Image: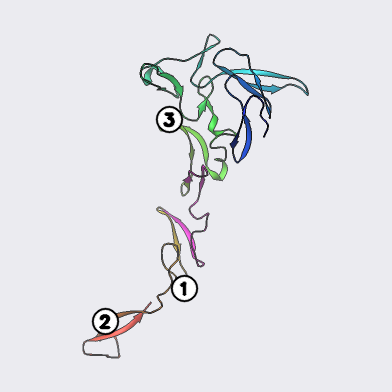
Amino acid sequence: CTCTNGKCVIEGGKYVCKCPPGYGNYTKSYCKACECGPNKSCIWISTGIFSSEKSCFCNPGYFEDNRNCVAVPCTQESQCGERQKCVGEEGKKTCQCDDGLGGESCDKEEWCEDIGKFKNCKGENGKCEYSKEKRSVVCTCDIGKQFLPEENICKGPCTSNPCKNDGKCEVDGQGFKCNCTGPWKGKTCENDCPKYPIQLVLPRYQLQNQVKENQQSAHHC
């Protein structure tokens, strides 16, 4: 990976050129200075084969005020705008976007974008959206599916075929259950019939052949 003025990082399983604050991706391998002013970064938008124009925006934790990007001081949440929280060391707290949000008004759901944390949370893999209750961008799963934090997507409990030995997986309120076939038993049909049958002791009147007085044995698997 080549990344002039920036740093190559792994995102989504591949290397990308990540630019520092004050720089923007002029090309996929070159970070160019924005020269937008203090506390600002930019993106470069191609306008032709050999030309590009820049669009400036405030760095995380800063907000536009009369075309300047300033940190908004705060001591409590009520002093911050919607989708913002008051964070930082005591005496140095500022209003910042909730987790996964960006943009000047914190209206940009960055974790849902192509290189974001939940970029694959879409379609049958879930829905990427902002949760006001959790104060964060989240991956919301449909009923019957579970969120997998290692992949940041939703999957049905039967997707990975957890049932062994030809067992049939069925989604239920607790996740899944396996309908086992033949002698197989257990949560995932992993246990077969014991090698030596279990001996049951039953009253004489339940069986025809008496082994000893008042008792009779039988095998059950």
State the residue at coordinates (47%, 73%).
182
Vertical arrangement, residue 65 with respect to residue 10, above or below:
above
State the residue at coordinates (35%, 19%).
90
Disc 2 to disc 3, C-alpha distance? 62 Å
Residue sitting farthest toward the left: 214
| Amino acid type assigned to the residue bearing label 1 in the image | Gly
Mainly helix, strand or loop, the magenta region?
loop
Residue sitting farthest toward the top: 66
Q: Which residues are magenta?
A: 147-172
Vertical arrangement, residue 186 with respect to residue 198, above or below:
above
- In the shown orientation, is residue 113 left or right of residue 48? left
Q: Which residue is mark 1?
A: 182
| Amino acid type assigned to the residue bearing label 3 in the image | Arg
Disc 1 to disc 3, C-alpha distance? 50 Å
Of callouts 2 and 3, the N-terminal one: 3
Callout 3: SS? loop
Is 62 a magenta residue? no
Which quarter of the rendered picture does the C terminus lie within? bottom left
Residue 14 seen by the camera: yes
Q: Which residue is mark 3?
A: 135
Q: Position of residue 14 (x, y in %)?
A: 63, 39
State the residue at coordinates (21%, 90%).
213
Residue sitting farthest toward the right: 49
